[in-house]
Image (spheres, rainbow, N blue to C red):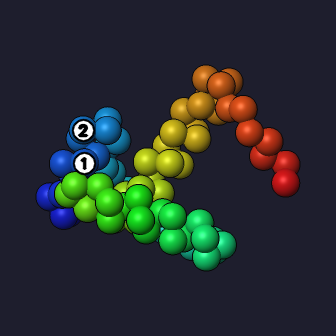
Amino acid sequence: MDMLVQSGANRCGVVMSSTKKRLTISLELEDYDALRALAEGHRPPLSLQYILSVAVKDLLEKHAARQLALPLDK
């Protein structure tokens, strides 16, 4: 595993598991560009995979704590 990603995961409290599942998503171009800028703007730069993993983990934690404020029925 890339040491930068592992280091970033440790700082953010994300556990990097060896039992991962792969999925594919499609994003609007504007969203993709914004995510890429966020990842590249971090020092050290982060991967899009890492940024999305953190976002999904945050979504699931908020859902579990019943603090999810966005509608998921769109």
Q: Position of residue 6 (x, y in %)?
A: 21, 52
Which residue position is annotated with label 2? 11
Return the mark for residue 55: none
- Kindly tell me whether residue 23 is visible in this rendering: no
In the drawing, does residue 9 fall left or right of residue 60? left
In the drawing, does residue 69 fall left or right of residue 54? right
- Kindly tell me whether residue 11 is visible in this rendering: yes
Closer to the camera, 32 or 26? 32
Q: Residue at x 51, y 39 (%)?
A: 58
Q: Residue at x 59, y 66 (%)?
A: 31
Residue type, label 1: Gly
Quadrant in the rendering for residue 67: top right
Give the SS element for disc 2.
helix
Q: Position of residue 50 (x, y in %)?
A: 37, 58
Tell me if mark 2 has few (under 14), some (14-19) or many (20+) residues whose alpha carbon lies within 10 angstroms of its own. few
Quadrant containing the C terminus in the rendered view: bottom right
Closer to the camera, 3 or 46? 46
* 2 in relation to 12, above or below: below
Q: Residue at x 51, y 71 (%)?
A: 33
Residue type, label 2: Arg
Quadrant containing the N terminus in the rendered view: bottom left
In contact (CB < 8 Å): disc 2 and disc 1? yes
Give the SS element for disc 1.
helix
Quadrant in the rendering for residue 68: top right
Q: Residue at x 32, y 35 (%)?
A: 13
Kindly give the residue lying farthest to the left in the view shown.
3
Which residue position is annotated with label 1? 8
Q: Position of residue 38 (x, y in %)?
A: 41, 59
Kindly give the residue lying farthest to the right in the view shown.
73
Tell me if mark 1 has few (under 14), some (14-19) or many (20+) residues whose alpha carbon lies within 10 angstroms of its own. some
Q: CA distance from mark 2 to mark 1?
A: 5 Å
Q: How many marks?
A: 2
